[in-house]
Amino acid sequence: MLVGLLHMESYLCFFRKQQHLDINDIDAELCLNYLRELRNKCAENGSIAQTDIIANPKLLEYCFDIFDKLHNYNCSDIQIKCLRVGIQFIGNLLVDNPLNKAIIFVNYYPTIRKWIFNKDKVVANYTEMVLYNLLIDIEDVRDAICNDEHLLEKIVVDAEEEMEFGMLLLEKLTGHSFPLLYNKLSDKYRINLLKFFRKCLLEESITISVGCIEYIKELFKQAFEQLLDQTQCNSIEQTDNITDRVHIEILNTISRITYTSNYKSVLDSDMDFVSFILDKLLIIQQRGCDRTNIFSRHSDFHEIGTSQLPYHPVYGVKTILVQIVGNLCYRNKLIQDKIRDSNIIPVIVDCFKFDAKNPYITQWAIFTIANLSYNNEENQRAISVALAGTNMKDCNIGL
């Protein structure tokens, strides 16, 4: 036995005595030294040390009791160091050891869960490291986290704050369990989750299931229908609300997917979805012809967000749709032709005109026209016709 019988007896004797003491009577210095020894033995000697320690359940029982006392107490600096190193010890006890993970999960998961809410961010981060290690081999951990709204909220916030293991945990969960996370969280946290998901799309090391992409595609359809329902009246005096902001984050997420090569095919192979996008762009264009509608073009950027023109989350929606159309038709003859046949080319050309409600729409329209033109003579002719019918002085661009 690597840890050794004599050493193990000394550990057991020490932690048994400390367990029964009041928090202020615990020998924090010696406790810290012993915990460092245990942590380092697991790191340096791997499965042999892990096996020796897990074979002594009383040692773990004493340690967890002490850690929980420290968690529930307003600790001194030395006491908080004990808790930090103690959680590192538990983390090292689990690395690459499925049996130890199962034992710790079955016996101590509710206790570990509490530590993630410790006010000390280092303690919280180390606890997320333990949860991450458990998650790697135990599917029940995924279920426990995904069904725990309060815990999910904390992980989302920590990932947003770029805490290392909060991010790793959320990455691990998001790739295959995004629908579960989204359904469990309130709108406030859905916004952060969607922003984080977009970051994951750009990471080659993170695999996102097709099921997650399909789920977001359905969210997109629902979100767009709701946005259109809420904005069909002619009044532009509409207030911002968090649900609308969630809808916009969903739209931005679909836009990100359309220029992510690993996942774009889930969208551009679905011609019903392409038709949905084109139909909604046409509806927004038609509504915008009414100067009193929220989708109408506006010429003065400085008035956005003032009493003259209160900000609304749908400002920018048209730009997002043009982005999506431009990305979907990139070197895709079938979608290029469908856009022409759906009479969307004049709509894209009309987006050359400046619109303060849709920043960068001119640039994205030019990008989309370039992609529509690529190796497609029929589209080139249709674009020429559309340009001939447009007053380019209104566009303020050089072509």
Image (cartoon, helix red, strand yellow):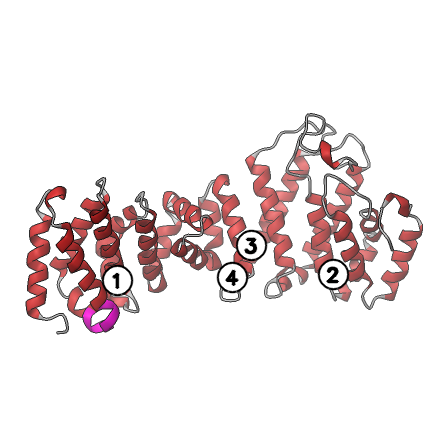
- Looking at the image, tell me whether mark 3 or mark 1 is earlier in sequence order: 1
Q: Quadrant of residue 311?
A: top right
Which amino acid lies under the numbered mark 3 shown in the image of this protein?
Arg
Residue 138: percent from left, percent from top: 33, 62
Asked if labels 4 and 1 touch by Cβ distance under 8 angstroms, the answer is no
SS at mark 1 in the image? helix
The residue at which mark 2 appears reads as 329
Chain-order first, disc 3 or disc 2: 3
Between marks 1 and 4, how big is the CA–CA gap? 26 Å
- Local secondary structure at mark 2: loop
Residue at (15, 69) in percent of width and height: 52
The amino acid type, in three-letter code, at marker 1 is Ala
The alpha-carbon separation of the residues under discs 2 and 1 comes to: 49 Å
Q: Position of residue 74 (x, y in %)?
A: 23, 39
Marks 2 and 4, how far apart in space?
Answer: 23 Å
Type of residue at label 4?
Ile
Relative horizontal placement of residue 7, taking residue 112 as reference (left or right): left
